[in-house]
Each structure stands twice: as C-alpha cells, then as structure tokens.
C-alpha cells in the first residue's frame, strides 16, 4: 500500500471531529485541470469510491489521498515554436526580441499549447496516527512531502504542529557502523543493495546491487571517507525497504509471511481497502519505532523556561506511551 515513507512527528494537536475534517477536505476536493491550467491538486477518495469519504478511519488510523494533475508541455516544442516566432518578428521588424519580451512570448506559446497537452496524474497516500503522534507521507522526496504537510497543517486544524522526525544518530552514521562491523541492529538484516558516496565536490560514488555487502571492500570504501546514502534492509523478516541518509524509507515491500499470516491478499474482496490499511499500518507501526531505536532514539526539541533542550526518547518508550 505504501511504497515510500517520510515520517513526521505531531508536536501538538487538538483533533477536530471526522465530520469537520471531511468538510475541510471537501473544500479542497480535486478538480481536473482546465483547458489552460498547467496544474491542479486536491483531495480524492482513498477508498476509490466516487463521491465517497475523503478521509477514512480504519481502526483509529486516518488515511487521506492527494491527487496532483499536471499538463506538461514539451520543452523542445516550446523552444521550436519560440524560435520560429522570434525569427518571424526579426524578419518583419529588423530586431530580435530579447529579455522580458522574449519571456512573454514564451509564456504565450505555453498558454496556447496547454489545451493540447496530455494530463498526467499522481496520487499520494497520507497516514495519520493520532495515538502514536505520527504522520507518514508516501513520498520519496522531501520537497513533495513538505508541500503536502503544509496543506495538512492548514486542513487538519486544531493547532497541529508537524516536524520531520529526527533521530539521535544520523542514518548515514548508523549505516556506516552497520556496514563496517558487518552487524545489523537487533531485529533487522542488511540486504544486497547499497550506495556509498564521497561527501565532497566530486561526489564519487559506489553502488552495489544484488551483491552481498558482508565484504571488506565495503568497509574500505567507508574508511576512505565515503558515506552510505542508501541501504537495503529487512525488518523481522516481514518488511523490506531501503533506508536513505535523509531518513526516507523507499521500496517498502510487505513480504509473503505478512500476507500469509493475515490470511488474505491485499486488495481482494469488498473489504480489501480495510485489510490493506490494517496490514500496512500494523507492520509499519511496529517497524518505525524499532528503526528509531536502532538509530539511537528520537531527537526531540522542547521549549523549557524560554530555552531549548534536546533529549533522546527511546523508541520503546514512545511505543509504550502510545
């Protein structure tokens, strides 16, 4: 259900009712791009039922879905049309438009081509776990996730504060240690994919794909200064993923043992959506605290008597409190 995960911590929130959240989302319901509109974004039904609810509550887990439609106009087409227009003007007037005038001509061309552009849509799932105080965005890039989180802050109301989840030990530092010592943290295993990159202007990199990482060569690259930017891992033999230096989980995959244990395959039957949500949130709801623990605990900034204090919260304590 979730292919990627960027996790945000809910700092504070006085949740509105489901009806109120639904009304807020309805005000931003997705509408397709108009003829000359380059982009449109809005909320759609997570369950996929037309005119259904825009927020679903499955066992206390809130699921939303944002749809973005873009109508890209090929740059090569715009460039060719612009050059043709500029040459025509130059032939008629003796001068070739530049600067602001050329920019305005380019905008006119794009505007004229938009009605013929083919729209492309992308959908992003969002999981809000009020009890655990987490929001998970199914996005691989920080820019995309932050844009969605900005909308969530406005829509969910209740004074919600969202900050990107951070850990005491950076993922790059932790991954370096796991690879050097050839020892994964408890509950996890290192798989057969890794990227190491030199943190300098040259950005020299080494990639391993479908290759054992339990070799001295990997440690030698790290000793030379390269840092892991991506590392494939598996949690508890149940969920595989790729951890990145920015604490993003990519290529999330529920393994067969999870589906067999659930007694059903996701997406089948009338209750496929509820089953998908229950399985995915159930597994990730256990994986995330254990990953935080493996990275030294959560880094939490608190306001204390006008100052700031930084402290680590063990993931197990977070899970118990939740």
Image (cartoon, helix red, strand yellow):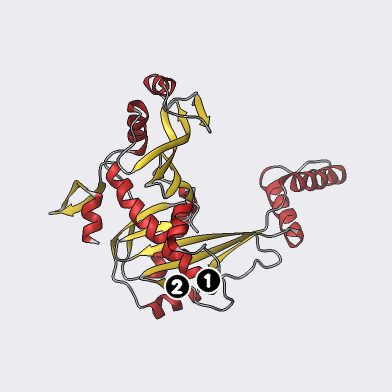
- Label at residue 125: none
Name of the residue lying farthest toward the right: 91
Residue corresponding to mark 2: 56
Name of the residue lying farthest toward the bottom: 19
Q: Position of residue 253 (x, y in %)?
A: 49, 50
Residue corresponding to mark 1: 47
Q: Position of residue 147 (x, y in %)?
A: 47, 56
Image quadrant in which you'd find residue 243: top left
Among numbered discs 2 and 1, the one appearing first in the sequence: 1
Relative depth, front residue between 149 and 215:
215
Q: Is residue 284 left or right of residue 90?
A: left
Q: Is residue 239 left or right of residue 134?
A: right
Q: Is residue 106 left or right of residue 93?
A: left
Q: Position of residue 104 (x, y in %)?
A: 69, 52
The residue sitting at 37% across, 71% down in the picture is 59
For marks 2 and 1, give the CA distance.
Answer: 8 Å
Relative depth, front residue between 147 and 265:
265
Relative depth, front residue between 12 and 95:
12
Image quadrant in which you'd find residue 50: bottom right
Q: Where does the C terminus fall, quadrant-wise?
A: bottom left
Q: Is residue 19 left or right of residue 302?
A: right
Q: Are marks 2 and 1 in contact (CB under 8 Å)?
A: yes
Q: Position of residue 35 (x, y in %)?
A: 71, 66
Residue 163 in view in this figure: no
The residue sitting at 44% across, 62% down in the picture is 262
Q: Residues within 10 Å of mark 2 (few under 14, many from 20)?
A: many
């Amino acid at each position: 259900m979730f292919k990627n995960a960027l996790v945000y911590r809910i700092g504070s929130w006085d949740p509105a009712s489901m009806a109120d959240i639904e009304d807020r989302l309805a005000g931003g319901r997705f509408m397709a791009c108009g003829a000359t509109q380059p982009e449109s974004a809005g909320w759609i039904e997570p369950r996929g039922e037309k005119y259904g609810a825009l927020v679903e509550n499955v066992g206390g887990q809130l699921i939303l879905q944002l749809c973005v439609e873009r109508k890209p106009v090929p740059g090569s087409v715009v460039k060719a049309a612009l050059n043709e227009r500029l040459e025509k003007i130059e032939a008629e007037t003796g001068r070739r438009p530049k600067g602001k005038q050329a920019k305005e001509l380019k905008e006119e061309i794009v505007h004229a081509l938009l009605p013929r552009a083919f729209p492309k849509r992308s959908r992003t799932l969002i999981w809000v776990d009020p009890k655990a105080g987490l929001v998970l965005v199914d996005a691989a890039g920080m820019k995309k996730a932050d844009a969605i989180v900005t909308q969530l802050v406005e829509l969910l109301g209740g004074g919600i504060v969202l900050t990107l989840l951070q850990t005491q030990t950076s993922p790059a530092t932790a991954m370096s240690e796991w690879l050097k010592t050839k020892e994964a943290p408890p509950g996890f295993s290192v798989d057969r994919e890794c990227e190491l990159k030199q943190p300098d202007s040259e950005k020299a990199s080494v990639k391993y794909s479908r290759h054992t990482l339990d070799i001295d060569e990997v440690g030698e690259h790290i000793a030379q200064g390269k840092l892991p930017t991506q590392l494939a891992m598996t949690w508890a033999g149940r969920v595989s993923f790729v951890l990145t230096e920015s604490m993003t989980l990519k290529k999330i995959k529920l393994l067969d043992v999870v589906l067999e244990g659930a007694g059903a395959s996701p997406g089948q039957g009338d209750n496929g959506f509820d089953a998908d949500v229950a399985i995915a949130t159930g597994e990730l709801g256990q994986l995330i605290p254990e990953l935080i623990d493996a990275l030294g605990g959560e880094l939490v900034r608190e306001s204390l008597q006008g100052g700031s204090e930084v402290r680590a919260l063990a993931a197990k304590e977070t899970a118990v409190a939740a």
